[in-house]
Amino acid sequence: MFNPTRSIVSRTIALPPENIDTDQIIPARFLTTTSREGLGKSAFFDWRYNAEGRLRNDSPLDGFNPDEFQILVAGANFGCGSSREHAPWALADFGFRAVISSQIADIFKSNALKNGLLAVEVDPKTHRRLLQSPGETVVIDVESQTLALDDGWQAVFELEPFARHCLLNGVDPLGHLLAQSADISAFEARRA
Amino acid sequence: MTSESNSVSPRSLFDKLWERHVVAEETRETPAVLYIDLHLIHEVTSPQAFAALDERKLEMRRPDLTIATLDHSTPTLPPKPDGSLDYATAEAAAQVEKLILNCERHGVQLLGLDDPRRGIVHVIGPELGLTQPGKTIVCGDSHTSTHGAFGALAFGIGTTEVGHVLATQCILQRKPKSMRVVFDGALPRGVTAKDMALAMIAEIGADGGRGFAIEFAGPAVEALSMEGRMTLCNMSIEAGARFGMIAPDEMTFKWLHGREFAPGEDRWQAALADWRTLQSDPGSDFDREIRIDVSSLSPMVTYGVSPDAAAPIDALTPAPRSDAEERGADYMEIAAGKAFSDIAVNRVFIGSCTNSRLSDLRAAAEVMRGRKVKAGVTALVVPGSEAVKRAAEAENLDKVFLAAGAEWREPGCSMCIAMNGDKGAPGELVVSTSNRNFIGRQGKGVRTVLASPATAAASAIEGRIADPRKYLEAVMETASV
């Protein structure tokens, strides 16, 4: 239930630390919500706000026009820890359309892709380059599974084929499961 | 290879669990459709899934295979005199109400606030016999791997997937790679499953299990109690693995026998015959195999902000191995080359789905009995479930904790996730039996050191990170007199 994503052309924000866990992406105290909307204001809250709750303005995530910086480049093992889907909801609501790292944690990656937030794992060399030069314009093409920079740097990335299909066509994976209803009934009957 | 020789090739426990639940095989284009036998839900990760169901005007496919409880947002202080609960925020109370409402509307059994079976979702599943060998179990919670201790295929999912299971009782999943972690040797006294888990994570890294399903095996795993096995499987995700599992054995079967939702006497023998097949065949292939000898393992503690920053308590604090560890050391204010026993402790938390079961509380009580929590240190003991609480009180463990000056609370996740109001103050150092030492996890600015219940209890007494073994040895001497 999201718009098709064929390609993303945008500038990057870099968060180099490794193992950025989902408690950093959205602290647990914001998880008492029963909605999935409006979580962008809580994204990386403790990195962006001081003890008095005022924006610090010294985090790499602020002082930018979010419309121009829709790609987050992060250190290895991004999104580890809690399975909270509030993490990709918060990042998407903040304005990100893609996350790039050398390694992205399993559950986060699965959650992100189900919300139209492109989670891309690139080779270590490309990863280093992107971390070292934040603000670059990156072209991510979902169809060809390639990533390109202005100076001609290119990289290919893996993307789980079904997630790619859903991204390209704006397909909700639940529809695919619902279409298996007869097989599910047969499975249940076999085991009864 | 012919299909015939394929059919007799050795299969791992994971292969067997996987194969039994395939509704539609994985293809190049699509993941497998896996059937889910048990769906556990709680207040935090389910409301948006129910909302998605409503938006599409869908009904739940199998409310009878779904069990709900309240654990994350619930207060651990008893009700106020007027019977109301002291929620951290109005939003937390509303979230609890939402689950109650969703369960009523969809006909899901809720083990709610007044139910004597309520507790942390990963404590009550096994306790009630809902968790069984051979089942697929999911929950919108990354510590669902806990249930793998019974030879179940159990894994944490996101809220969109919770919605998928509500609507179809199935999940889309590609088969992960397999890893076997073999623990050799016998655990020394005072060293526990928690220490095994931390030692493994330190060895393979917080991302070492990413993309893998882990089977834990070997003599040291077989020797663990069921509760110890749950602790070990619980921590799989801290190594990056969604799945952790242990082959069921006679101990597993004995543990389950007679529990409320376990197969009754009429079905027990048939269940056993089936469950006994749930072993990795000799010669099973694993994509990765590692071995760890536990015979000289010490109690482990963490010193950084990732669970893989763990070291033996009797070693000196290690030098940072990476930029990330350097930042961790700065946050923790733990310099390299220091004795752990020189690190002052402000607060101790004994609880969580990792270490809040009866044996955990006994281990903590053994250390605390007849001693006092150091002045200035706050110690919180939070049983994992109403049943654990009753059992502990029947043994007077509550009195041991209270006499020592610790607090004895109502069951829940409490300070593990610190979203119910139980948390540390900025700058405090907390020794915690939970599973994550992430920055701010136990409150903004709080520094977390992960440890076993015995280590946490010893640290509460000394007000410094403390090796529990000296207290246990003292008990042994007394006993032998």
Image (cartoon, grey):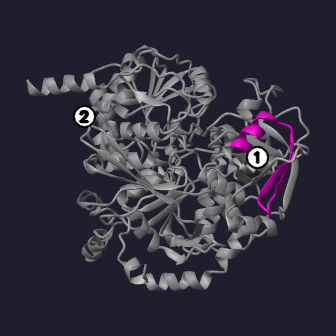
Q: Is residue B272 visible?
A: yes
Q: Secondary structure at mark 2?
A: loop
> Share a chain, discs 1 and 2?
no
Q: Which residue is mark 1?
A: A91
Q: Which residues are drawn in magenta? A: A125-149
Type of residue at label 1? Leu
Type of residue at label 2? Pro
Closer to us: A151 or B423: A151
Q: Does residue A25 appear left or right of residue A67 in this picture?
A: left
- Looking at the image, is mark 1 or mark 2 nearer the viewer? 2
Closer to us: B133 or B268: B133
Q: Which residue is mark 2?
A: B188
Q: Position of residue A54 (x, y in %)?
A: 80, 26
Within the magenta stretch, is there residue A129?
yes
For disc 1, the chain is A
Number of numbered markers? 2
Rendered view: A139 above or below B346: below
- Kindly identify the residue that appears in the image at 30 percent across and 31 percent down: B365
| Residue B280 image-quadrant placement | bottom left
Measured in 3D between alpha carbons, the distance from the residue under mark 1 to the one under mark 2, in whole angstroms, is 46 Å
Closer to us: B313 or B283: B283
Q: Which mark is residue B73?
A: none
User: What is the crowding at mark 1: few (fewer than 14 residues within 10 Å), some, or many (at least 20)?
Assistant: many
- Kindly identify the residue that appears in the image at 52 percent across and 37 percent down: B436
Q: Does residue B29 appear left or right of residue A144 in this picture?
A: left
The quadrant of the image that shows the N terminus of chain B is bottom left
For disc 2, the chain is B
The quadrant of the image that shows the C terminus of chain B is top left
- Kindly identify the residue that appears in the image at 69 percent across and 40 percent down: A25
Q: Does residue B410 appear left or right of residue A71 in this picture?
A: left
User: What is the crowding at mark 2: few (fewer than 14 residues within 10 Å), some, or many (at least 20)?
Assistant: some
Q: Is residue B68 visible?
A: no
